[in-house]
Image (tube, helix red, strand yellow):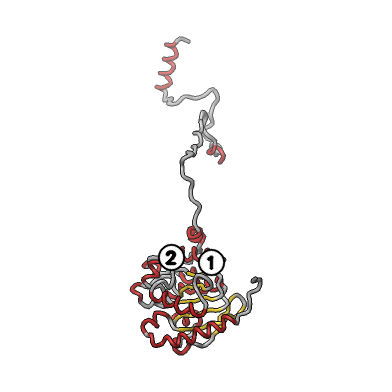
Amino acid sequence: MTDLDSLSALAWLVDAGADEAVGDEPVNRLVAKPAPKPTDFLQPPPGHRPLPAPQRSAFAPARPAPTLAQQARASAPVIEGDEIGTAMDIAARANTLPELKAALEAYDGCSLKKLATNTVFADGVPGARILCIGEAPGRDEDKAGLPFVGRAGKLLDKMLAPIGLDRTKNVYIINVLPWRPPDNRNPDPVEVAKCIPFLRRHIELANPDMIVLLGAVAVRNVMGKTDGIMATRGKWLEYHVNGRMVPVMPTLHPAYLLRQPAHKKLAWRDLLAIEEKYLALPAREGAA
């Protein structure tokens, strides 16, 4: 067949309505095509050449390891609408004081934190036999991120020194609240309730042999007593810590004594009782 014959045949087919080329074998259009296998979509097309894996520059900085706070924030359970329940879960997961500090810094459920400069966790010697608990950070504490560093803190150091106690040697200091209330206002009960799980876990992990409560707020939130500080100070109480009862002495807050110096004599009586009880404490198991 010549080229002219081929063109004539093609023109005849077009005039007859043919609009597509067919193969040598007939195709039954009434039979559905089989569905492609799922793996067919994963196969590269013919002639595909994968791109080479990117090479890490020797000068590229390594990704820093996540901090304890970042780890705590990533693993913290979030209970929508229940910030107190979330605080209880987060605090319970902390097994060491550094972990608790990281968990507290990762917790965003209390509005006090949003207005504070720093989280005020603790000062002194972790694991000391004496635990002092204050009320809330003031302006100086919020700025420094440490409890009792202002005028009240200096007075507290002077109160402890005559009975052989020192935050650099044998005392651990915390507050009921880790964040300063704006303008030193009284925190509302909900704000306090969100901090209490961290406070109670802090006491458990600090594991003291004696607790000194500084002021009425500490007495109310640790012991649950609503009596005024004048009615509770100087009277030994007990608090359950890790399966044992430890002695608790409520006394006047140093900030109160700065306003009422005549009551320093009452605080001095409490300090003498603390010294006597401290010296009578049995030696810790395993201590040299």
Q: Is residue 187 left or right of residue 97?
A: left
Q: Is residue 282 left or right of residue 102?
A: right
**x and y percentages locating residue 7 in the rendered image:** 42, 15
Q: Amino acid at mark 1?
A: Leu
Q: Is residue 190 visible?
A: no
Q: Is residue 17 above or below residue 5?
A: below
Asked whether 262 or 164 is in front, the reply is 164
- Element type at mark 1: helix
Q: Amino acid at mark 2?
A: Asp
Residue 97's label in the rendered image is: 1
User: Mark 2: few, some, or many residues within 10 Å (few <14, many ≥20)?
Assistant: some
Q: Is residue 136 above or below residue 8?
A: below
Q: Residue furthest bottom?
A: 231
Quarter of the image for residue 261 reads bottom left
Which of the two marks, 1 or 2, is nearer to us in this view? 1
- Element type at mark 2: loop
Asked whether 242 or 194 is in front, the reply is 242
| Residues at circles 1 and 2 in contact by the CB criterion of under 8 Å | no
Precedes in sequence: disc 1 or disc 2: 1
Asked whether 141 or 26 is in front, the reply is 141
**x and y percentages locating residue 99 in the rendered image:** 53, 63
Classify the position of the C terminus by image quarter: bottom right
Residue 81's label in the rendered image is: none
Q: How many marks?
A: 2
**x and y percentages locating residue 250 in the rendered image:** 49, 83
Q: Residue at x 49, y 39 (%)?
A: 58
Q: Is residue 231 visible?
A: yes
Residue that badge 2 annotates: 108
* Structural distance between the alpha carbons of marks 1 and 2: 19 Å
**x and y percentages locating residue 70 in the rendered image:** 48, 58
Q: Is residue 279 left or right of residue 187?
A: right
